[in-house]
Amino acid sequence: MKKPTMQNPTRTAATTAILGALTFFTVTARAQAPVAEPSAEDKATARALLDEGDALTKKGSLEAARDKYKSADAIMGVPTTGLSLADAQVKLNLLVEAADTYARVQRFPSKAGEPKAFTQARAQAEKRLAELTDRIPSATVKLAQGEPSDVMRVTIDDREVSAAARFLPRKLNPGKHQVVVDSGEFRGTQSFDLPERANQTVTVTLAATGQPAFKSTSTTQTPAGGGGSESSVGTVPPIGGDRATGSTVHPGVWISVGVAGVGALVGTISGLGAFGAKRDLETQCPGGVCVTNEAKDTYARATGLANVATASFVLAAAAGGTAGLVYFLTSEPAPAASASIMPVVGPGYLGVAGSF
């Protein structure tokens, strides 16, 4: 296909490099391990994508142009296509991504007989990376109160930061960002605008969420660097003063109360059964004389239920006394606090209720 007379010099070099790559790949294919060499169709597609990217760049459609260059680079993966992609990323202010792409171009293996454009692209990538590095700003997350905890999760622009780097200076693209610090129990959000070359500290104020804290997923905490500041594993800082604390009821109190409630319930049921059997005996044993087998069975049932009721009430009383003893031995009195406990009886149930 005959090319137009007027062409972009940079693009002409990139296109020439792609054409040269075809010969380069063919010559070196036998001298190295088998690789997935782009086909002639792939190369033609990549050239078309580069040309489309140039046209979109002239129109000011930088994101669409970047996508064209990215597709061409994904097909070819050579220094010239990588350089075009990195330059487009710089135009979009994606300095972190551009630095990574420049570094990849710079590291592209050099081989004998490769196109001259490859060597030139490496040199240009090295130069542009050195110029770009100083432009990339960084942000360091800091808490307004307390010290970092190993259960805290830090996200910047909805991307979670690794545990080792949560409170270290982090390279970011210039522009607007948002950081969130969340431990489950405490949470804070802070938006900030990061200019080029800045080394900015972003202070986050935490507030209680009323939720339980996250379980720790990290066993170590890396001290924060820069500025001589320190951070260590600590507890989630209290917000608005000390949290209210109260006396904790010993588990033995609740166990004893539960046993007392069960004993009282069983005793009540057994006692009612015994009273019912006693009324049956009055009918079955005229004059107090029980001679029939039915009367004897009723007597045995009444006696058994009465014994169970007695034992249950004794157990309930003992458990209730134990609950009171354990409570007073293990609880610390609090000012202006009161405790009460009372039985609760209703249709089909018997229990206790109290306030402490």
Image (cartoon, helix red, strand yellow):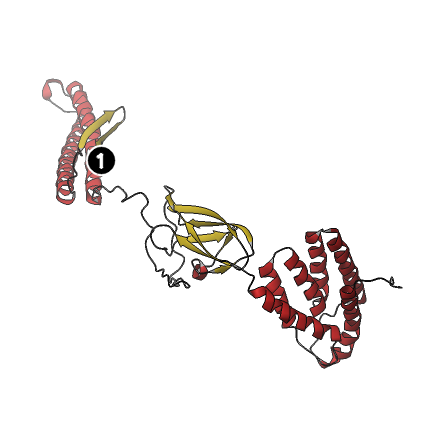
Q: How many marks?
A: 1
The crowding category of the residue bearing disc 1, from other C-alpha atoms within 10 Å (few below 14, some 14 to 19, many at least 20), is some
Say whether residue 289 is left or right of residue 219.
Answer: left
Say whether residue 177 is left or right of residue 64.
Answer: left
In the rendered image, which quarter contains the C terminus?
top left
Q: Position of residue 123 (x, y in %)?
A: 67, 73
Q: Is residue 351 above or below residue 72?
A: above
Q: Nearer the viewer, residue 206 or 221?
A: 206
Q: Secondary structure at mark 1?
A: helix
Q: Nearer the viewer, residue 302 or 180?
A: 180
Q: Nearer the viewer, residue 328 or 173?
A: 173
Determine which residue is flagged by label 1. Answer: 262
Kindly identify the amino acid type of the residue bearing the numbered disc 1: Val
Q: Position of residue 323 (x, y in %)?
A: 16, 39
Q: Is residue 323 above or below residue 10?
A: above
Picture quarter containing residue 295? top left
Residue at position x 69%, y 56% from top? 66
Residue 108 visible = yes
Residue at position x 12%, y 44% from top? 329
Picture quarter containing residue 217? bottom left
Say whether residue 239 is left or right of residue 166.
Answer: left
In the rendered image, which quarter contains the N terminus?
bottom right
Q: Position of residue 205 (x, y in %)?
A: 39, 47
Residue at position x 11%, y 22% from top? 289
Q: Residue at the far right: name it.
A: 2
Picture quarter containing residue 151? bottom left
Q: Position of residue 115 (x, y in %)?
A: 75, 75
Say whether residue 48 is left or right of residue 187.
Answer: right
Q: Is residue 345 above or below residue 308?
A: above
Residue at position x 77%, y 70% from top? 17
Residue 301 visible = no
